[in-house]
Image: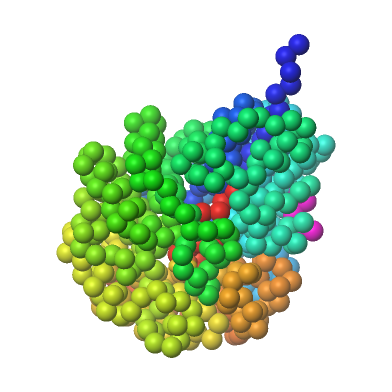
Amino acid sequence: MNPHIPHILFVNPWIHDFAAYDVWAKPYGLLSLAAITRCHGYQVSYIDCLDRFHPRAGKTDPYIRNGRGPFRKKTIQKPGGLSDINRTYSRYGIEPEWFREDLSAIPKPDLIMVTSLMTYWAPGVRETISAIKKIFPTVPVFLGGIYASLCYDHACKHSGADRVLSGSTEKTILDIFETYFGYRELSLYNPDDPDTYPYPAFDLQRVINYVPILSSRGCPFSCAYCASGYLNDAFTQRKPEFVVEEIKYFNTRHGVRDFAFYDDALLVNAKSHAIPMLEQLVNDDVNVRFHLPNALHIREINEEIASLMYLAGFQTIRLGLETVEFQEKRHQLDRKVSEKEFYDAVNVLLSAGFEKDQVGAYLLCGLPDQTTASVESSIRTVLKSGITPVLSHYTPIPHTALWPKAVLSSRYDLEADPIYTNNAILPCQKEPFSWEKVLYLKNIIKEGSDNNKPAIPEMVEAGCASEKLGSTHN
Ligand code: SF4
């Protein structure tokens, strides 16, 4: 008789929010875990509640807008505490009925692993786990990811998961299986060396319309608003040649043209990391497009790097400017950049050949004590520099240095429920949410950007977007 091979189901949950859009947002960590699980001989299934290409959804071209696109959405009731917000709240992703059918169509799993991203998407995670439990009531559900790591106690109490996993599960997944299944497979990778990991299992998706790349994990800086330091044990970088191999693999094997770097600190140690990687991409004439939804460190950008990025095919560049207050106020938040460094970086990028609408500067909006005038001043400075301002609504994140101040500044009880940290509602402003104020700032950008291209929503978080797209996804 054949021994039973454990079957693990991996699930990317629904999003509940006021707005959500697929801006190169894939569950990198979950698919990395699926790849590790698969290469150790376990059976693997994957269901993506955010699947934009579900067979029951209308036909849509996966490759327009460099792979980005809207999620399907259905209006749902706002959580009680957010009834003061005059905006529509939705479930983003596939229909619940399709999810039930997809769950019922697979063999009963032995274990189900669900990921989580934004802390304030907790209600979507809860609904996903509840739907799973209706089909597989006796199968244990483990929850990992960013919400699980940042709000561990809340997730234990409210998610409905049987077990909550905090931190990077890529290193511990075989231990978890050993505890649960009672035996251990011989490890085929070194948990401390991401270059030995199998490539994330993007092939489990129906369509691979773009691929995220993680060439480093963590960040050597510690900005007051960012959780990168909490979510990653240390700053580590992969070998450039292995990263290039991975890009070539997805390009030649799966025809992928668009790649989004998820790094928090792509240009740190550029001489030994980004520069050789970019040089190899240019020399090998790898014909793909690169996008940087996470911000670059401005002071690391010089003529050589700008030129290599241009030649390698970078199409979307984001700079971590955050504010144009360059003196004391800024130093309470971060020490990322001076005024001169910002202007120098813009000049070398535009001189290298980038168009002004390819280069955006993230500007934080909704920080504790921040005035509308201060954000407006930052927007006008960026417009004057010749590139595009991109508003990045501040999300208060537990375990960051700014969290205590955020809690004191907010009109909500941030510690009571992560739904109150939703950056769409500017939770750290004392006065009630004003959609007019947000539109006022957006209009300044629109009028100053003098391009008529339809805006693509940018789902970004404080700083280098490290909660949304950062390196701890599992
Ligand atoms: S905001 Fe960016 S630079 Fe600052 S700690 Fe986070 S990832 Fe690093």
Q: Is residue 179 above or below residue 428?
A: above
Left or right, residue 437 beside residue 73: left
x, y percentage for residue 41?
A: 62, 26
Left or right, residue 41 beside residue 237: right
Any part of residue 57 in sight: no
Q: Main secondary structure of the magenta part?
A: loop
Which quadrant, please, contains the N terminus? top right
Magenta span: 157-161
x, y percentage for residue 219?
A: 47, 62
Left or right, residue 373 beside residue 9: left
Identity of the residue drawn at 21% across and 59% down: 304
Queried whether the magenta region covers residue 377, the answer comes back as no
Any part of residue 187 in sight: yes
x, y percentage for residue 471?
A: 51, 54
| Count of numbered marks | 0
Identity of the residue drawn at 18% across and 60% down: 352
The residue nearer to you, when weighing 272 against 242, is 272
The residue nearer to you, when weighing 246 against 123, is 246
Identity of the residue drawn at 40% across and 63% down: 295
Queried whether the magenta region covers residue 160, the answer comes back as yes
x, y percentage for residue 329?
A: 45, 86
